[in-house]
Image (cartoon, rainbow, N blue to C red):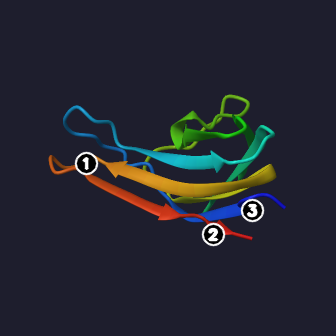
Amino acid sequence: MGKGALNWYIPDGFIPPVSKGELLSHESICVLNCGDEDAQILVTVYYEDQAPLEKVPAVCPAKRTKHIRTSSLIKDGVGIPVGVPYAMEVESNVPVIVQYSRLDSTQAENSLMTTMAYPL
C-alpha cells in the first residue's frame, strides 16, 4: 500500500456567502499524491436537508499536489451552494493524503483555517 489512504472524510464544509476586500472566501480540498499513478478522485457532498451531490470527479496527477476548490465541484450543472453547511467524502483509486482549507474573508481581517481530513 502506498502513502496515504483511499477514503477521506471532511465533516465541516461551508462556503462563506460574503467576501470583503480583494480575496474571495473559498474552500479547498488539498490532495497530495506521492505515488506513481494518477489519482482518480470522486467527491461526494452531503447536506443537512437535501440529497447528496454524488461522485464529482477530479484528478491529482502522480507525484503532484492538487488544490480542488469546492466551488469548482460541479456535476450535471449542479454545484455546492454558498452559505449552506455540508460535509464531504473523498475517494481515490490510489492512496493519497487529504487536507482541507477555508479562507474566510467575510471581515477585513481575513482568517485561514486548515485541518487534516479523516482517513479510513
Q: Earlier in the sequence, mark 3 or mark 1?
A: 3
For the residue pair 63 and 29, the one nearer the viewer reads as 63
Residue at (69, 48) in percent of width and height: 34
Kind of residue sitting beneath label 1: Thr
User: Viewed as shown, does residue 19 lie left or right of 6?
Assistant: left
Q: Earlier in the sequence, mark 3 or mark 2?
A: 3
Q: Are marks 3 and 1 in contact (CB under 8 Å)?
A: no
The circle on residue 106 is 1
Q: Earlier in the sequence, mark 2 or mark 1?
A: 1
Give the distance between the C-alpha atoms of the residues marked 3 and 1, in whole angstroms: 34 Å
For the residue pair 76 and 27, the one nearer the viewer reads as 27
- Give x and y (percent) for residue 68: 57, 40
Residue under pointer 2: 118
**Category of crowding for the residue at label 3, using alpha-carbon neighbours closer than 10 angstroms: few (below 14), some (14–19), many (at least 20):** some
Q: Image quadrant for the C terminus?
A: bottom right
Give the distance between the C-alpha atoms of the residues marked 3 and 2, in whole angstroms: 10 Å
Residue at (16, 51) in percent of width and height: 109
Q: Which SS class for mark 1?
A: loop
For the residue pair 18 and 28, the one nearer the viewer reads as 28
